[in-house]
Amino acid sequence: MLEYKPLEKHSIDQKSLKHLVREGEGANLEFKLKTNHPDKIVKEIVAFANTRGGKLLIGVSDDKQIKGLKFADEDLFILKKAIEKYIYPVVDYEIEKVILDDEKEVLVFEIPESPMKPHFVDLDGLAESRKAYIRVADKSIQASKEVREILKGQRKGKELRFVYGEKEKVLFRFLNDNKFITISKFADLVGITKKQASRTLVLLSLTNVLKVLPMDIGEDHFVEA
């Protein structure tokens, strides 16, 4: 199995850090003041790896205050252990330390988009309870079964085809008049099970006919690509 190793580098100075923080949290940037709950912080790392990558700043508050860490090496040790223990499969990341004027430090974790999607948070060592997360705007949300299947299919890179049958015709007529469709709505619309509806919409997403818009609350939305 391919294993990733953390790499420490030094290219972000205080000026660059302040510029980053001014941008505020978003799809590729997350702030954490401390490492009190490393089991929760790994969700952000997994979400970045499963989406477009991003930076996690430790020592910065949600309201953009650069507080820094007094004992950064201890926080770094805690997070490295949490990453090793709770993330499956292992993720690639780079670490930078930015020294502040008061000698405190900010930890910058840079997580690239992973070629090994989906990654999971595994808190208890049981495969059935693993949870995948993705980044949507400034939130890390749990990935649905459909999103996980799409991530897995994209990783495999197989050439896929679909048959344009009656249920697909009904689907696209619906999307001509509506912005999106959900698994439940599609199942009801064409009289199939949710499992069949899920399989169809995932396949259409993998062939770039549809695109999935993950939702924090409620069912994911599928739209024309």
Image (cartoon, helix red, strand yellow):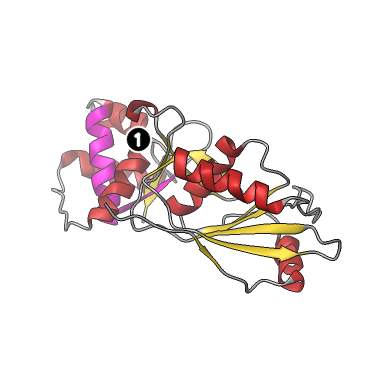
Instruction: Say if 105 sits above or below 90 in the image.
Output: below
Q: Residue at x 16, y 40 (%)?
A: 166
Residue 86 image position (x, y, % from top left): 46, 38
Residue 180 image position (x, y, % from top left): 42, 43
Q: Residue at x 28, y 42 (%)?
A: 201
Q: Residue 3 falls in which quadrant of the image? A: bottom left
Instruction: Say if 159 sits above or below 9 in the image.
Output: above
Residue 37 image position (x, y, % from top left): 63, 35
- Determine if the magenta segment contains residue 200: yes
Q: Which residues are magenta?
A: 195-213
User: Could you tell me which secondary element the residue under label 1 belongs to?
Assistant: helix
Q: Residue 182 falls in which quadrant of the image? A: top left
For disc 1, the marked residue is 145
Residue lying furthest right: 102
Identify which amino acid the numbered label 1 is placed on: Lys
Q: Is residue 213 left or right of residue 2?
A: right
- Determine if the magenta segment contains residue 198: yes
Q: For this rendering, which residue is in front, 193 or 32?
A: 32
Q: Quick one: label 1, few (<14), some, or many (20+) residues within 10 Å? A: few
Quadrant holding the C terminus: bottom left
Q: Residue at x 58, y 51 (%)?
A: 137
Q: Is residue 135 left or right of residue 146?
A: right
Residue 194 image position (x, y, % from top left): 28, 27
